[in-house]
Amino acid sequence: MQRERARTIFQKGAPGRRAFTCPELDVPALPADALPERFRRAEPARLPEVSEPEIVRHYVGISKRNFDLDSGFYPLGSCTMKHNPRLHERAAALPGHARLHPLQDADRSQGALAVMWRLQQALGEISGLPHVSLQPSAGSHGELAGVLLTRAYHEDRGEDRRKVLTPDTAHGTNPATVTMAGLEVVKLATNDDGGIDLDDLRAKADAGVACLMLTNPNTLGIFDPNIEEIAEIVHGVGATLYYDGANLNAVMGISRPGDMGFDIVHFNLHKSFTQPHGGGGPGSGPIAVSDRIAPYLPVPVVAREADGTFVLDHAREKTIGRLRGFHGNYGCFVRAYAYICSLGADGLRDASETAVLNANYLLARLRQLGVAESLPLAFGSLCMHEFVLSGGPMKRDLQIKTLDLAKRLLDYGFHPPTVYFPLLVDEALMVEPTETETRETLDAFAEAIAAILAEAAEDPEIALQAPYTTPVRRLDEVAAAKTPIIRETLA
Ligand SMILES: Cc1ncc(COP(=O)(O)O)c(C=O)c1O
């Protein structure tokens, strides 16, 4: 069958064609000036005019051109692309959840508030930090909440602290968040073992520091064994310690950020606690905080009264305010709560242990296949739930870069790992297999990498021109980033 040339939805259909017809209006129409003048358009918006079959085929067609977790292995480092159990979808789709209006009164949404409260309790327990807000919509949004909380805490104590320490392995959202919150980023160096350089930390920790943002294990997949000393140094100068919880999948049920000395943590519910993600959301990035940060939490917080009823508690004098409309991405809460309940405490621990085991198995298998010479492990010899290889030797010896390897993996049926992050690793390739993959899949992935390296030794052009089997071939990524055409001009 000939593949249809990609056309936007605006280029399909015909004037007057409809996928849905609204019923006759049976309530009084709003007056023309119900919407303030500044929000009104001179002309109605030009929307696509398509039939239902056209719209269904359009979006199903697009979905088939994409690579997704339900079709294959997706070892995108730092993103925890684990399988999303279908049971969670069933729970989230129950009409009592899916059809609940976000403005429903608290007394008529007790079931939903109970789910939210129980999720808060569970996240408090998992993190070792008892006060939770479910509001943030993504990890980075949780980071912003955390840095604003830190700012509010210091300001309330009359302290002017503007510096936030971020390791050079930090995810890009960490420094971006600091800047958005109006504070100043100060970089911390990494030591030879892949952890924080303690001398650099001691030199930079002073009375002007508001916070240290850290993920442990970090983005190199290495657990920093000096965490207690780090916490001591940071708390010693009166700063707070922020835990980027994106890597929680390595430590759930094993170690808790609160016990390590962290004051604030964000969770990526869409990573560690399963949610379909990778297509832009919706995500969820709740935060958990210690007693001293709790007075500043966003409002409202879901609370339980002495008689067992659930309420939306707005009474927080020192709150940083609301972070978004309504109460958060509720469907994500249901899925995360279903995940926690179906696994239980032992199951969560098991998931993390298996995630770490799978990553180390894959690393060992790659070594066994002789891959380490071209793609050595950047730091250490073992890893936590993910590992970072350096493609530097591969580039030097085989004349293919990490990007070429990644593109060629698509032809072998695998989504590429994360590339070129963390920035301190030359030609970085960051692999996170997760606990939900089988040994056969891990073996097949390792063999594909070995095969690509063998191909490149014969003829580097094969990888340089890849991919060959995808709906589109190699894209001009610079042009796509710098001059994107994101909208067709209508004829
Ligand atoms: C280590 C780390 N921190 C923070 C984030 C930000 O999370 P989100 O993408 O949900 O905003 C990510 C996301 O990839 C991450 O890997």
Image (tube, grey):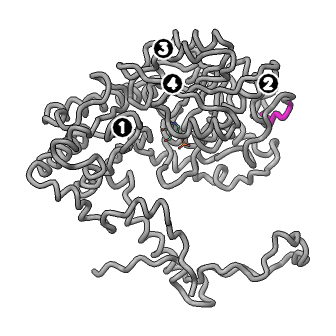
Callout 1 environment at 10 Å: few (<14), some (14 to 19), or many (20+)? many
Q: Residue placed at 22% from the left, 54% from the top? A: 412
Cα–Cα span, label 3 and label 1:
27 Å
Q: Secondary structure at mark 2?
A: helix
CA separation in Å, label 4 and label 3:
9 Å
Label 4 lies in ligand 1 vicinity (Cβ under 8 Å) = no
Can you identify the residue that label 3 sits on? 198
The location of residue 450, given as percent across then percent down, is 16, 43
Q: Is residue 82 visible?
A: yes
Figure quadrant of the C terminus: bottom right
Mark 4 highlights which residue? 188
**Callout 3: helix, strand or loop?**
helix
Q: Tell whether label 2 touches label 1 (CB within 8 Å).
A: no
Q: Which residues are magenta?
A: 310-315
The label number, if any, that marks residue 155 in the structure image = 2
Instruction: Give the prevailing secondary structure in the magenta stretch.
Output: strand
Q: CA distance from mark 1 to mark 4?
A: 24 Å
